[in-house]
Image: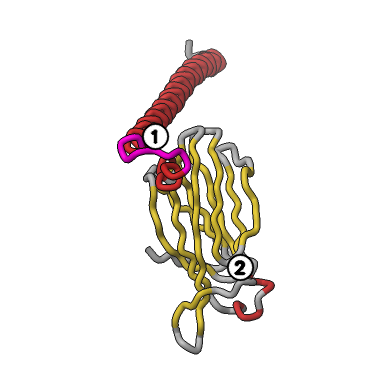
Amino acid sequence: MVLSVPAAAVTLLVVWIYPSYALYFHIGETEKKCFIEEIPDETMVIGKYRTQLWDKQTGSFLPSTPGLGMHVEIKDPDTKIILSRQYGSDGRFTFTSHTPGEHQICLHSNSTKMALFAGGKLRVHLEIQVGEHTNNYPEIAAKDKLTELQLRVRQLLDQVEQIQKEQNYQRYREERFRMTSESTNQRVLWWSIAQTFILIVTGIWQMRHLKSFFEAKKLV
């Protein structure tokens, strides 16, 4: 999927909770790309990226020079920065969510320092892994000396744990939606009561005004 927006714009993509996905996008030297990832609490997320620089001579994207870096910034649902770091042209970042909800993952380049990148564009390949998909099971099996059956059981336990976290997150979202609905209904009720009160007061005032008018004209 190719993304294209005007320079200096921030693109927000709402990505549902997939355990792992990969995409690529293009950015200019002043652009910033942001992605919204819905993540349960206490869940590890690993992001991997690599960059390619547009080459005018060949008319294609080539591997970026080592001096070209990417800045990664991650905010939790409360807009608190939980990661802000400069990486190289290829990199890997890791964070653990402590608050369930929408986490914002933003990337932008330090292209202003790169004369070769001036006026060009950069292609970024991004892969996001969530939950048990962040585990390197061959490495775990070698480290803990697990048999194939033991490793499979370990994978199943991790999957069950991740499913429980996602279920808890869905319950959390449902609770927030219920609270929002109740709050909205309560506001609508009070607004209806206020409208009714205003209509009654207006009616009483009109009746008194008309009575005073008729009395002044000696019609009653």
Mark yes or no: residue 210 visible.
Answer: no
The quarter of the picture where the N terminus appears is bottom left
Q: Nearer the viewer, mark 1 or mark 2?
A: 1
The residue sitting at 56% across, 16% down in the picture is: 216
Q: Residue farthest to the bottom?
A: 57
Magenta-colored stretch includes residue 147: yes
Name the residue beneath numbered marker 2. 30
Q: How many marks?
A: 2
Q: What's drawn in magenta, residue-wise?
A: 143-150
How packed mark 1 is, by other alpha carbons closer than 10 Å (few <14, some 14-19, many 20 or more), is: some
Q: Position of residue 93 (x, y in %)?
A: 56, 52
- x 50%, y 86%: residue: 56
| Left-right relation of 205 to 189 | right
Per the image, the residue denoted by label 1 is: 158
Q: Specify the principal SS of the magenta part.
A: helix
User: Residue at 46% of width from left, 87% of height from top?
Assistant: 58
Sequence-wise first label, 1 or 2? 2
135 lies above or below 187: below
Name the spot of residue 193 as percent of width and height, x first. Answer: 46, 17
Check disc 2 and give the amino acid type.
Answer: Thr
x, y percent for residue 25? 45, 65
